[in-house]
Image: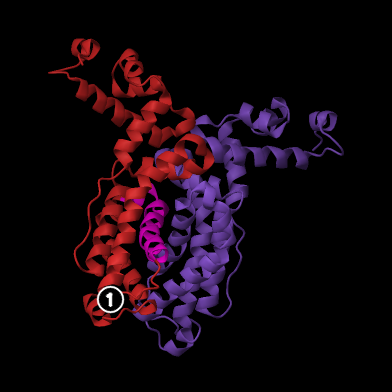
Chain colours: A purple, B red
Amino acid sequence: MSEPLAAATGPGRPRDAEVDRKALRAAVELYAELGWAKFTLDAVARRAGIGKAAIYRRWPTRERLITEALEQALVLPAIAIDTGSLREDLLELARSAMGYYLGPYGLAGLRLRVEAHACPELLAGLAAGAQRSRVLEARAVVRRAIARGELGERASPTLILDTLLGALLNHVLATPEDLRAEMTARSEQYVEDVTAFVLTAATSIYPGSSPDRAASEV
Amino acid sequence: MSEPLAAATGPGRPRDAEVDRKALRAAVELYAELGWAKFTLDAVARRAGIGKAAIYRRWPTRERLITEALEQALVLPAIAIDTGSLREDLLELARSAMGYYLGPYGLAGLRLRVEAHACPELLAGLAAGAQRSRVLEARAVVRRAIARGELGERASPTLILDTLLGALLNHVLATPEDLRAEMTARSEQYVEDVTAFVLTAATSIYPGSSPDRAASEV
C-alpha cells in the first residue's frame, strides 16, 4: 500500500513501516507514562512526530491503536525454553522475565496488569493475551521436570512460578528510582539467587523419583 | 472548624469528618480506576457527591488531595508482628499482605507502585512512604528469626520477602476478573502454601543454630 503523507513528510527514505514503528512505539511509551484514561491519538501523533491524519487513517480509534501496540510490544515470542534440566529452565525463564521487567516495555506491561482490573472491558483481554504464552511456557517447564522425575507429580506450577516470577516483579517494583541502576547491574546475580531459592523449596517439597539429578544441579 | 456547605447539603448529622471521609475515599477509588494523569478535583467532587467548593477549600491542589488520600489509605498501621516463631510471623505477614491486595485499596496501591516509576516527582515519595512500614516490619521478622537461631546469620531478608510477598502479588495480578471470586475464596489456603514453600527454602539455604525449632513448625 502506498502512503502519500508519509512519503511527503517523513525524513530520509520514508516508508509505511517506519511511520507504523514510530506510532506504535510512541503509543506504548505514552501508555506506560499516562495509562489508558489519558491515552489519545493526538498525543501519540505529537510524541511520534507524525501527522494526526496518518495516525487516524491507520487507527481510527484509540482502542485499535492500543490493541495493536500492546500486542506487538507485550506478547512475547515463544522462546521455547527446554534445556533438559529444571534448574536451567527456571534460570532461563527468570532471566527472560527480568529482562522484560527492566526493558522498555516492562512498565507498560505492569501498568496493563494493574489496569486490566480497573477497566476490564478492553484491557483485560489484552493482559490475558500478553500473559498467555509466558504462562503456558512456564507450566510446560514444570510438567517436563515432573516427566523427567526431577519433581514429584503433585508439584504445583502455580506456586513455583508465582514465587519465581513474583519475586522478580516485587524486586523491580520495590526498588526506588535512585537505586534502579544498581539493581539493574546486580540483576543477574539476583536472578540466580531467586532461582536457587525456589528450586530448593520445589525439590524439597515435591521430591521426584530421581532427586539426585535435581539436587546435584543446585 | 465549622463547615457551612456540608451542614447545608449533607444528610443526617453532617460533620467535617464525614465530608473528609467521602472525599478521601472517592479520591482513592478514582485514582485506582484512572491513575494520576486523569485525576482531578472536579471528578473527586462528583464521585463523592459533595460540592466542588468544599473540596477546593480543603485541598487547593490535586497534589494535596492525593497525598493525604493515599497516605491515609496505603500507609498501613504497624501491626507489630512478633509471635516468637518464624513460621507464624511469615504467615501473619503474608495474610496481611493478601488482605491488602484483595481489599478496597489494593488496586490503588498497585497502581501507585507502577506510576511511581512513570511519574516519580510526586508519586515516588508516596510509594516509598506507603511501603516503608511494611518493609521495616518484614525485615524485623527475619532479623528476629536470626537472633533466635531459626535462620543463619547470612539469611537474606530481601530474597525471603520478595518470594513471599511477590508470589501473592503475582497471584492476584495474574488472576483474570472472572476467576477472582474463586481465587479470593481460596486465598487463605494459598497464603499457607506460599508460606510453607518459602519457609522450606529459607531454612534449607540458611540453616540456623536451632534448626529443629524451625523444621518442627513446617
In the structure shown, which secondary structural element does the residue marked by tag 1 occupy? loop
Q: Position of residue B109 (x, y in %)?
A: 37, 43
In the rendered structure, which amino acid carries the disc numbered 1?
Gly
Residue most toward the right? A12
Give the residue pinned by disc 1: B149
**Residue visible at 35% across and 21% down in the picture:** B59
Does residue A44 appear left or right of residue B36 in this picture? right
Q: Is residue A163 visible?
A: yes
Queried whether the magenta region covers residue B22, the answer comes back as: no
Q: Is residue B189 visible?
A: no
Above or below for B79 versus B31: below
Number of callouts: 1
Q: Position of residue B37 (x, y in %)?
A: 49, 30
Front-most of residues A110 and A120? A110
Q: Position of residue B112 (x, y in %)?
A: 42, 41
Above or below for B6 versus B68: above
Q: Which residues are magenta?
A: B157-180
Does residue B166 appear left or right of residue B93 in this picture? right
**Residue visible at 56% across and 80% down in the picture:** A84
